[in-house]
Image (cartoon, rainbow, N blue to C red):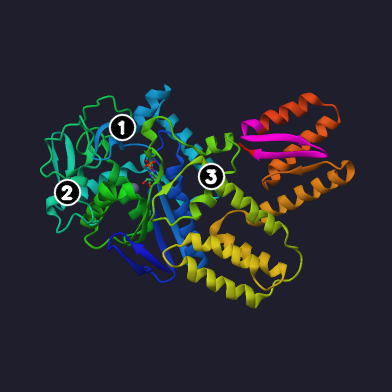
């Protein structure tokens, strides 16, 4: 495949250190709050990338950290620990918060068909390794002790700005207004490897170390977790674009200084999901979650479909209107798949030909929108339904939209609706969403059975989903408002 590499700013042929095997690392969530759907955009695109590499025949070892210590309110390691902030907000312990939001993160992932990585490692579970690496960096002269903390000395590197599209000004990215520069630092970009002294003395989790009781900086966890589970040579490192600086830049600095050789060749960064009012952020207080989508009646997989329709390197604007459009398109796609007749043998030669086409399309810098378009090309193909279904099933190994399962459900709903219609002549017309059709039909049946309380309850449920029902002769019609 060809993949854009943000370290070289070029689209390059994907390569691995060991033929046929991909060592892949993903920066995991900071578990002090629910993931917002922006975070999940990054995880969806990384999931498709992993699945595509498997589709190409690679064996993938994917490793992810869980940040449960050390990520301060500013990415430039200043301020309060985010985990502690979350614990205070909810009057719980840091470990309770970490457990709750880690579970919530994986529950969201499951709803979005995001596979769990082979290795998931919370940062607090590997403190001894972090200490060994920090000591190694001190021994090699890449770190220094000042004011109670251990810092990485960026002036010791031949080159620090790996993702060199960052302007000097942008290097202040994580520094909040009102946060003073740390006067212990010898150079502006130096960063903390181990804290024992912070302005926030009430940091909950602390460990003994050669430099005193303290806790690790944020960046060291990803280097150590990757080196432990991916080995010395990482093939592919992923994250949202905001992680490129300072987080990934610092990961490279400390990993290469420690290892003494190049660490990771390929860097995959996902552009942000924004709303009309700007970047989504957990610290803004109110943010969009998978649960909110569900409360509003959306299938989380529609959000995945929405993400796949855009290229991962382009910013994506979220709006309810955009999600409505994705819902309509997805339901139409499902209805068309539901109209295919399952059962026969697939034509293996045609299947192989279409799989090759898909690899070429999606293999061009993970072009998922072409992958989605390819689904429609299959529906138009000059081949039998069984082969079409086999191709769609194959593409869905990468896209993970549960296409065949969902289409089977549509088929069932349609059969039920037809039976009900034959029995009572009750017709439902709407915007082509089988789940809503079924609810409107159920309301019609409740009315016929004079169960008006149930009929009203269903009407209210539909209203809460933004659907208005109008009774018409011989049935009902519905529309989204
Ligand atoms: P965090 O939980 O803050 O550590 O972030 C988890 C992941 O989400 C990281 O890879 C971030 O780069 C990514 N991320 C944060 N905000 C957004 C956004 N608005 N859109 C896409 N990805 C994001
Ligand atoms: Zn990381």
As drawn, the residue found furthest toward the top would be 91
Q: Position of residue 346 (x, y in %)?
A: 70, 71
Mark 2 sits on what residue? 168
Q: Is residue 478 above or below residue 387?
A: above
Disc 2: CA contacts within 10 A as few (<14), some (14-19) or many (>=20): few
- Mark 2 residue element: loop
Find out whether residue 13 is within the magenta segment: no
On the rendered image, what quadrant is the C terminus found in?
Answer: top right
Mark 3 vs mark 1, foreground winner is 3
Mark 3 sits on what residue? 323
Q: Position of residue 395 (x, y in %)?
A: 58, 63
> Considering depth in this image, is 53 or 145 the residue closer to the camera?
53
As drawn, the residue found furthest toward the front would be 473
As drawn, the residue found furthest toward the bottom would be 349
Residue at x-position 34% and y-position 33%? 82
Q: Position of residue 192 (x, y in %)?
A: 21, 41
Find out whether residue 466 is within the magenta segment: yes
Per the model, the C-alpha gap separating discs 1 and 2 is 26 Å
In the image, is 229 to the left or to the right of 436? left
- Mark 3 residue element: helix
Residue at x-position 61% and y-position 48%? 328
Mark 1 vs mark 2, foreground winner is 2
Q: Is residue 7 above or below residue 420?
A: below
In the image, is 116 to the left or to the right of 385? left
Contact between labelled residues 1 and 3, with CB atoms less than 8 Å apart: no
Mark 1 sits on what residue? 81
Q: Is residue 92 above or below residue 334?
A: above
> Considering depth in this image, is 226 or 4 the residue closer to the camera?
4
Q: Position of residue 143 (x, y in %)?
A: 16, 47
Examine the rendering and report whether any part of residue 114 can be seen: no
């Amino acid at each position: 495949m060809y993949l854009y590499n943000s370290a070289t700013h070029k689209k390059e042929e994907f390569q691995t250190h060991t033929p046929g095997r991909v060592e892949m690392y993903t920066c995991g969530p900071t578990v002090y709050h629910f993931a917002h759907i922006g975070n999940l955009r990054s995880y969806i695109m990384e999931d498709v990338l992993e699945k595509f590499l498997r589709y190409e025949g690679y064996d993938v070892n994917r490793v992810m950290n869980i940040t449960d210590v050390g990520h301060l309110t500013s990415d430039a390691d200043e301020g309060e620990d985010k985990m502690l902030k979350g614990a205070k907000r909810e009057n719980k312990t840091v470990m309770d918060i970490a457990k709750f939001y880690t579970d919530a993160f994986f529950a969201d992932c499951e709803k979005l068909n995001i596979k769990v990585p082979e290795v998931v490692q919370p940062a607090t579970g590997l403190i001894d390794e972090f200490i060994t690496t920090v000591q190694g960096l001190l021994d090699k002269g890449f770190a220094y002790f000042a004011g109670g903390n251990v810092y990485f000395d960026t002036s010791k590197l031949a080159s620090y700005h790996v993702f060199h599209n960052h302007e000097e000004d942008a290097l202040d990215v994580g520094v909040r207004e009102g946060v003073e520069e740390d006067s212990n630092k010898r150079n502006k970009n130096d960063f903390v490897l181990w804290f024992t002294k912070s302005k926030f003395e009430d940091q909950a989790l602390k460990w003994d170390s050669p430099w005193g009781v303290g806790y690790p900086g944020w960046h060291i966890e990803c280097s150590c977790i990757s080196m432990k589970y991916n080995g010395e040579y990482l093939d592919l490192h992923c994250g949202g674009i905001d992680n490129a600086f300072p987080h990934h830049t610092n990961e490279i600095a400390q990993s290469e200084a420690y290892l003494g050789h190049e660490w990771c060749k390929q860097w995959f960064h996902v552009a942000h999901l924004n709303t009309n009012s700007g970047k989504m952020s957990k610290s803004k207080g109110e943010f969009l979650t998978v649960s909110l989508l569900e409360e509003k009646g959306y299938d989380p997989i529609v959000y995945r479909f929405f993400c796949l329709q855009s290229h991962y390197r382009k910013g994506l604007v979220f709006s309810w209107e955009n999600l409505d459009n994705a819902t309509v398109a997805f339901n139409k796609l499902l209805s068309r798949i539901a109209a295919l007749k399952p059962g026969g043998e697939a034509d293996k030669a045609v299947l192989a030909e279409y799989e090759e086409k898909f690899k070429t399309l999606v293999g061009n810098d993970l072009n998922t929108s072409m992958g989605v378009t390819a689904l429609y090309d299959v529906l138009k193909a000059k081949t039998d339904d069984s082969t079409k279904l086999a191709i769609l099933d194959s593409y869905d190994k990468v896209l993970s939209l549960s296409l065949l399962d969902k289409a089977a459900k549509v088929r069932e709903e349609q059969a039920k609706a037809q039976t009900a219609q034959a029995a009572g002549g009750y017709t439902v017309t709407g915007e082509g969403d089988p789940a809503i059709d079924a609810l409107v039909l159920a309301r019609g049946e409740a009315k016929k059975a004079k169960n008006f309380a149930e009929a009203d309850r269903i009407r209210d449920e539909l209203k809460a989903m933004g659907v208005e029902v109008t009774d018409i002769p011989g049935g009902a019609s519905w529309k989204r408002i």
